[in-house]
Each structure stands twice: as structure tokens, then as C-alpha cells.
Image (cartoon, rainbow, N blue to C red):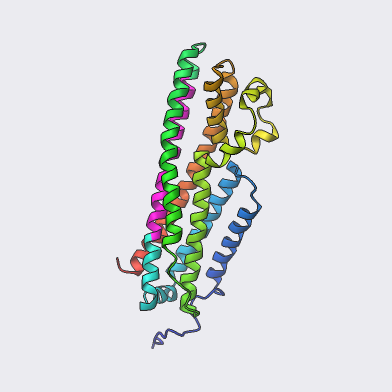
């Protein structure tokens, strides 16, 4: 005969449960990565995306545990579980914004590269293409800024749940920490693809001068910068200087940006699928 479930069962999935320990390990690695990063690059952002994928893969396994599910449906935790469900939808919405932003950026980049190839020597055509690109990027940036504001509001909105000091509360505590870290990483991701994080740094040195000395492409300094922001800033400098003589340098920046976008798209899509999977599991647990 099956042993009846009691709320004080010692077999509840506490922090010492193997899967919960895996979640803690992933959280620790992400926090360490945050602390170690003085600036964002595509490699560091990609590494964090991979970390989030591993984290949410573990979360789905954690939610599959019968004892986790029993804890979540208890009356004293249901409200918190529903808040986590609402928060997961907001996170998916933010991921969709990021996916759309990357897709639009890639399309604009490819279109501008095509203009440079087809209209060799046509400086006016190049200039108009750059202006169109920057207008599109400005619109995308506004959408990203709005998404960042929504994330900040979410961090203050969904903070009413407490641990309650028991093992059942440990389930909520684990899931709450996962959501908090995920939100912080998405903030960093959005800032990266919008170029907001890199703008102040890029403004402190002359990109016009860098254009003139374009043999520096591929230097260690270039590799440490945000490829997306670097391409945008280079194009803005072209407009300001009215100098369209260094298209080779610009094309190199656009190629770097496109490769960066492709890698980020793949990582974000994998994360998106894992987030959906975990959300569906939670929906089923709460019988929505």
C-alpha cells in the first residue's frame, strides 16, 4: 500500500536533493560569471545563455518530481506558484522581444551589406543605406528599452512570496532564485543587443580615428568590445564624418556583427524552448 502523503515528509525536494543541488550549482556558476564580467562581449553573453539553458533544463526535471508538485499545490504555496507562472510568461515575452530584435538587426545588416556590394563607389547610395539602417536600429532600441523597464517592474512586483522556513517553502525559494537570476541575465542580454551597455565606453574614444587606422581590425581591443554596438557606432561615425572611404572596415564590422547575431539567435532559441517546456509543466501542475 502506498504511504499517504504528509506535508512534513523528510523526502520533500529540499536544497539537498540531487536535482536541487544541480540547480544550485548552475545558479552559482551564473552568479560567478556575473561577478567576473567587467564588460559584456559576445563570448560572455553566449556563455551565460548556455548556463541559463542548463539551469532551466534542471528546473523542468525538478518540476517533474512528484514531491515538488505536491508542495506547489498546497494552499499556502499556490499563490506563490501562480506568481511564478505569471513571471514565466513575462520572461517568455521578453525573450520574444529579444528574438525579434536580433532578427531585425540581422535583416538590416544583410541589407546594408548588399547595398555596399551592389553599389560600389556610390557614396550617396551607401550613405542612404546607413541612414536607413540606423533608423531601424533606433526603433528596435526603443522596444528594448521598454522591455527592460518591464523587467525592472517585474523584479519589484513579484517579491511577496516567502520561504516560510520549512521544506515545502524550499521549493518556492529555489524557483524564486531561478527567476531572479534569469531576469538579471536577460537584462544583460537586452542591454548587449541594444548596445546600451557599450555606448558610454565607445563614446570615450574616437571611432573616426579608428576608421582612419582601420588596419587595427582584429586587435585585442576589438575582440573585447560588443560586436553589435561596435558596428552601430562605426556607422554613426560615418554619418557624422561624412566619410564613406573606409567601406572595407565597415563591412568587416558588419560581418562580425552578423556572426555574433547568428550565435546569439541559436542560444536564445534553445533557451526559449526550455522556458516553454518548464512553463507547460508548471501549468499542468496547477491544472490551468
Q: Is residue 119 left or right of residue 206?
A: left
Where residue 237 sits: x, y (%)?
Answer: 56, 25
Q: Is 242 left, or right, of 210 in this rendering?
A: left
Q: Nearer the viewer, residue 197 or 265?
A: 197
Asked whether 98 falls inside the magenta stretch, the response is yes
Q: Is residue 57 visible?
A: no
- Residue nearer the viewer, 156 or 2: 156
Residue displayed at 47% across by 78% down: 164
Position in image of residue 272 (x %, y %)? 43, 51
Can you say which quadrant of the picture contains the N terminus?
Answer: bottom left
201 vs 151: above or below: above
Quadrant of residue 157 in the image? bottom left
- In the rendered image, the quadrant that contains the C terminus is bottom left
Q: Tell me the magenta residue range.
A: 87-115
Please identify the quarter of the rendering in which residue 80 is found. Answer: bottom left
Q: Position of residue 79 (x, y in %)?
A: 36, 71
Query: In the rendered image of this protein, does residue 92 appear above or below residue 164?
Result: above
Give the mark count.
Answer: 0
Measuring from the top left, give residue 18's x and y in whole percent. 55, 71
Q: Is residue 92 magenta?
A: yes
Tell me the residue at 47%/84% (across/down): 9
Magenta segment, prevailing SS (helix, strand or loop): helix
Residue, far left: 288
Residue 38, above or below 59: above
Q: Residue furthest top?
A: 121
Amino acid at each position: 500500500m502506498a504511504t499517504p502523503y504528509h506535508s512534513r515528509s523528510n523526502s520533500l525536494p529540499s536544497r539537498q536533493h540531487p536535482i536541487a543541488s544541480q540547480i544550485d550549482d548552475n545558479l552559482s556558476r551564473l552568479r560567478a560569471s556575473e561577478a567576473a564580467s567587467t564588460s559584456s562581449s559576445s563570448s560572455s553573453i553566449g556563455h551565460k545563455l548556455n548556463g541559463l539553458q542548463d539551469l532551466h533544463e534542471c528546473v523542468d526535471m525538478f518540476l517533474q518530481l512528484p514531491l515538488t508538485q505536491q508542495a506547489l499545490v498546497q494552499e499556502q504555496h499556490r499563490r506563490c506558484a501562480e506568481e511564478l507562472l505569471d513571471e514565466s510568461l513575462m520572461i517568455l515575452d521578453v525573450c520574444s522581444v529579444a528574438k525579434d530584435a536580433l532578427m531585425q538587426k540581422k535583416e538590416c545588416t544583410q541589407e546594408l551589406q548588399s547595398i555596399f556590394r551592389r553599389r560600389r563607389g556610390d557614396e550617396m547610395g551607401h550613405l542612404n543605406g546607413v541612414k536607413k539602417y540606423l533608423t531601424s536600429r533606433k526603433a528596435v532600441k526603443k522596444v528594448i528599452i521598454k522591455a527592460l523597464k518591464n523587467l525592472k517592474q517585474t523584479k519589484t512586483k513579484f517579491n511577496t512570496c516567502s520561504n516560510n522556513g520549512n521544506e515545502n517553502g524550499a521549493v518556492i525559494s529555489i524557483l524564486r532564485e531561478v527567476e531572479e537570476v534569469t531576469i538579471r541575465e536577460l537584462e544583460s542580454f537586452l542591454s548587449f543587443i541594444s548596445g546600451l551597455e557599450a555606448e558610454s565606453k565607445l563614446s570615450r574614444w574616437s571611432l573616426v580615428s579608428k576608421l582612419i587606422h582601420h588596419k587595427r581590425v582584429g586587435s585585442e581591443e576589438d575582440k573585447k568590445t560588443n560586436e553589435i554596438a561596435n558596428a552601430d557606432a562605426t556607422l554613426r561615425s560615418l554619418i557624422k564624418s561624412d566619410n564613406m572611404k573606409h567601406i572595407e572596415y565597415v563591412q568587416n564590422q558588419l560581418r562580425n556583427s552578423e556572426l555574433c547575431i547568428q550565435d546569439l539567435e541559436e542560444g536564445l532559441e534553445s533557451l526559449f524552448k526550455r522556458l516553454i517546456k518548464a512553463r507547460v509543466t508548471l501549468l499542468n501542475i496547477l491544472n490551468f
